[in-house]
Amino acid sequence: MKKILMLTAFALAGLAAAQDTTTPATPPSETSTGTATDTSTTTDTSMQETSGPATLSAPENFARAQEFAVQADVAYPVPFYDRTLWKAAVDSAYYAATMDSSNRDYQAYLAQLYTKTQWWINAYNAWNRLGNLSDQEKQWASLSAAKLAYIALQRGDKQMARMYVDKGMSWAPSASLQAIMSRL
């Protein structure tokens, strides 16, 4: 019981820290074509925090992303980007990956967070950009492709669903991809 209370207190303290609304900008979100669009707006620069993700180094943002992800795992039963701690983790990972685009670890961790938070299109695009994937990464990439194939099939876009299925099968064949393929 004591361990649970300590974990809960730890998670709530992290949640309170992550709910700072003065972060200078959110990372751009990606469109379905993989191009970035800047969705941030900043009007009052006097209110900006000096230790936000944009002012930290890539390694500091990477460490911060990992810390927020651990806290989010404890705080939330289901990971979604719109949860405060998951958003902080993804945003910090995004800044780390953007600041040091040659660091594969940062890129892979961002792709993992996109997958975990069910942001399927960003996950798919991030895995696709990485190129050579480990066996575990292929499983995550295949999952993102399967989710996008299912969504495309639900809206009647069989051509797009086929593209996602083919790419997902090239990463790692799965029962869900095979089931979607049988409906094409």
Image (cartoon, rainbow, N blue to C red):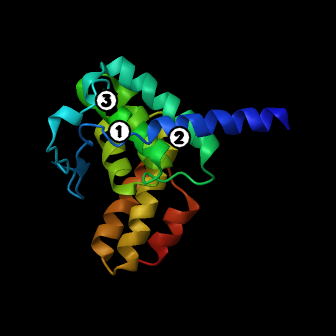
C-alpha span from label 2 to label 1: 15 Å
Residue 139 shown left or right of residue 9 in the figure: left
Q: Quadrant of the N terminus?
A: top right
Which residue does the numbered mark 1 point to in the structure image? 91
Q: Closer to the N terminus: mark 3 or mark 2? A: 2
User: Which of the pair 7/134 is nearer the observer?
Assistant: 7
Dot 2 amino acid type = Leu
| Badge 1 amino acid | Asp
Q: Residue at x 48, y 54 (%)?
A: 80
Q: Secondary structure at mark 2?
A: helix
Q: Residue at x 53, y 71 (%)?
A: 179
Query: In the rendered image, is residue 143 in sight?
Result: yes
> What whole-number distance in Å separates the C-alpha atoms at marks 3 and 2?
17 Å
Mark 3 residue element: helix
Question: What is the x, y in percent for residue 16?
Answer: 51, 39
Q: Is residue 78 above or below residue 43?
A: below
* Tag nearer the camera, 3 or 2: 2
Numbered label attached to residue 15: 2
Image coords of residue 70 (percent x, y): 57, 34
- 73 is higher (above) or lower (below) than 83: above
Q: Indicate the amino acid at tag 3.
A: Pro
Depth-wise, is mark 2 or mark 1 nearer the camera? 2
What percent of the width, then of the height, locates residue 61?
37, 25
Kindly check if marks 1 and 3 are in contact, taking CB atoms under 8 A apart as contact: yes
1 and 148: which one is in front? 1
Residue marked by disc 3? 53
> In front here: 31 or 181?
31
- CB under 8 Å between callouts 3 and 2? no
Q: Earlier in the sequence, mark 2 or mark 1?
A: 2
1 to 167, vertically: above or below = above
Q: Earlier in the sequence, mark 1 or mark 3?
A: 3
